[in-house]
Image (tube, helix red, strand yellow):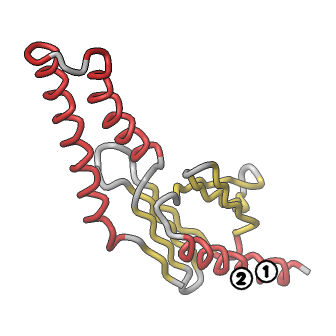
Amino acid sequence: MRLSNRNKASLYNFINTLLLMMVVLGIVSFLANEYRFNVLKNESYLLILVPVLMLFIFHLNGRQIFEYDSDGEALNFKNRNIIPFLNTPLYDEFPKYKLIKYDVITILFIKRLYITISSKNNGSTVLKYQISYLTGKEVNDLKLSLNKVVKANKEKKD
């Protein structure tokens, strides 16, 4: 099964650009209010605070683009940001038989995928992916696919 939200990259770029423009416009409006008009008094700080907070929340959700491929004998996970220099992209590929378990953690609007795989050195390794920008249907499809792999691995061990 293949799962990707790469086609939404242009939407995420648009939102990021819009938020950056709102920050710049908020700074200009703040400066104009402070030095020229002085209409808003202390509320003028909201002109900067609200857009910066929205931009912070957008990037707090994590990497926007998530790709998953379970076709063949390997599992492929890719997780990257729309701004290349902001975070290092994650790319992991490992055989299906190494998958031990997975967890999807949701806290408010932040979703994370934790994959536990068997490792020769430590016994197991946890891989972390940010899936906040996947829709509910995409997350359910991902869970269904990973459940199949985990179930097949448990049957092989028994």
Report which quarter residue 35 is drawn in.
top left
Residue drawn 31% across the image and 22% down it: 43
How far apart are the alpha carbons under marks 1 and 2?
5 Å
- Which residue position is annotated with label 1? 151
Q: Are marks 1 and 2 in contact (CB under 8 Å)?
A: yes
Q: How many other residues sit within 10 Å of disc 2, few (<14), some (14-19) or many (≥20)? A: few
Residue drawn 33% across the image and 69% down it: 8
Residue drawn 40% across the image and 47% down it: 58
Q: Secondary structure at mark 2?
A: helix
> Relative to 108, is 68 on the left or the right?
left
Residue extending farthest to the right is 158
Work out whether residue 61 or residue 3 is closer to the camera in this orientation and state it.
Answer: 61
Q: Secondary structure at mark 1?
A: helix
Image coordinates of residue 67 in percent, x first then y, are: 45, 70
Report which quarter residue 149 is drawn in.
bottom right
Q: In the rendered structure, which amino acid carries the disc numbered 2?
A: Lys
- Which residue position is annotated with label 2? 148
Report which quarter residue 139 is drawn in.
bottom right
Image coordinates of residue 29 in percent, x first then y, are: 16, 28
Q: Quadrant of the N terminus?
A: bottom right
